[in-house]
Amino acid sequence: MEMHCVRYFLAVADTLNFTRAAERCRVRQPSLTRAIKKLEEELGGELFYRERTHTHLTELGRSMLPLLKQCYASALDAEALAVKHRRGEYTALRLAISHTIAMDLLADHLKELNRVLPKVEIEYFRGTAVDIIEFLKHGEAELAIAGPLGEDWDRLDSWSLFDEEFVLAVSECHPYATQESIELSQLCDIPIMIRPYCESYSDFVDLFDAMGITLQQVQLIRQDGDLLPLIKVGLGASLIPRSVGTGYGFRMIAIKDAGLKRNVCLYSVAGRKRTVAAAALTGLLCSEN
Amino acid sequence: MENNITNHSSLEEKLARNYERICNKMPKEAEAYRSLLDQLKAANLNKYAIGQNQVMPPFLLPDENGSLVEMEDLTSEGPLIITFNNGHWCTFCEIELANLCEYHMEIKAGGASVVAISSMNRWAARQLADRLNLTFPILTDVYNGYALLLGLAVRLAKPFCRLSYPVTRHENTANDVESFIVTAPATYIVSRHGIVDACHISSDFRDRMSAEKIIEYLKNK
């Protein structure tokens, strides 16, 4: 596959109009049409139903779209990295991280990035799902790491990093501390600390409502940095992603059959030029998945 | 028979015997490999991919230990041999990697270094490196982006993708998957100036550049 053919395909898939796609790609329409035809020959079938006013993707086109989107975005990163950069040259990275992502998950990668790009300047932002989207939309952050953002913005590119379950974090002397797992309904019986800044918070509220679970003695927390010491001294328990509590020295109890999970992703904005630092960090993070 | 493939056979013989073994014992895999032949031919790689005398786009990719490896660091020491490889699911690629590893010391003695580039994640890369006792790194090309930049990315369609599914990243279940993007098998010899001195892009997965040929090339250079 040639990179420009994939770029033209993505433009037609987005605009569903060959003329507008050619304008966007700044090529003449016959060139774009030829490139699409070539890609179709290679992929073994038509990618679009060409109708006068209703160009739309064929089944093959639909199945190839997410694959080619990811491959093309990754090729843009490779292209950014293919520009010869000298060690010691200044580069910048603006990275938004959800309140629910422990920095431990990123520390080794950031150290490696710094080894290769010793003059990289990194600015970190923290926020909720809503904040993260705003950081990306307004260009304040180039990359973001978070759980599900619940946003249907078509320019949002996401790269799955890992899945993890939510567990009940309790102190060593908590009544549930000796149990391997508990039922979700058992949360009614203990003091709970709530994390409204969590991307999955509203899903949990909906789930509790649906199951008729009413939490008792609720404490409202604003950041994990405040939450973890309070759990440790036994002031309450909380539903947290497993990675948040790892290495903190309290018990993490599995929740039976509730399916409380999240998918942590790396996010960026499609079509924006990437810095060397962003492209390199993307490679490091995604190579683990 | 796999155990008939002795270390003394040439790479060509080992690849041919592997194909024979698959055809005789694994009809589904054989069918899939035959369809791969058609797909590689349709991709017309030798016409469009980066080739001899062209500038090799520099890479900065993570290895199986999570360290970033820069092409220029390797070419500054001498020629660089790059094998684009799917050894995590393709037995032909695995045989090629083992052949390179067997002759790695000789290649190094010729002043060259070796890397493999694959879309496998670094855990799969580490497993493969351990299994084959590889002495050179396997770099992860996330979602085949570097391969697309070079013109080496190809579509792998049914029935082949079902065989490669367990080790290829995809969110859906194997039966739902109609296609994958993979990197075509290829070997590049890149000069210390970053120019492609020689390359071998396989439109037939049984046809690879052997380590012996690489050594011969390095000697005559």
Image: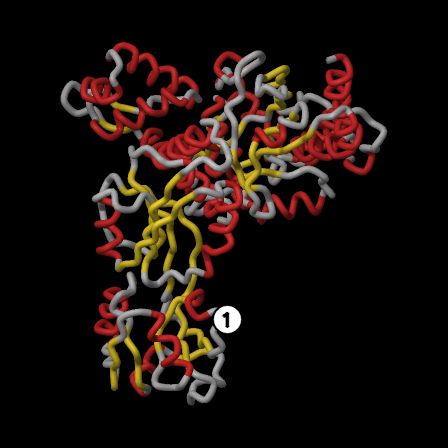
Disc 1 marks which amino acid?
Gly
Residue ID at (72%, 27%): B15
**Residue B217 x/y as whole percent:** 73, 16
Per the image, label 1 sits on a secondary structure element best described as loop
Give the answer, above or below, for where B73 lies relative to A98: above
Extreme left residue here?
Answer: A53
Taking A282 as reference, is B112 left or right? right
Residue ID at (77%, 22%): B212
Please name the residue that numbered disc 1 is placed on: A247
Give the answer, above or below, for where B83 lies relative to A196: above
Which image quadrant for residue A18?
Answer: top left
Residue B163 seen in this snapshot? no
Check disc 1: other Cα within 10 Å, few if <14, some if 14-19, many if 20+: few
Q: Which sits in the foreground, B113 or A179?
A: B113
Q: Which sits in the foreground, B1 or B192?
A: B192
Tally the marks: 1
Residue ID at (71%, 40%): B134
* Quadrant location, the N terminus of chain A: top left
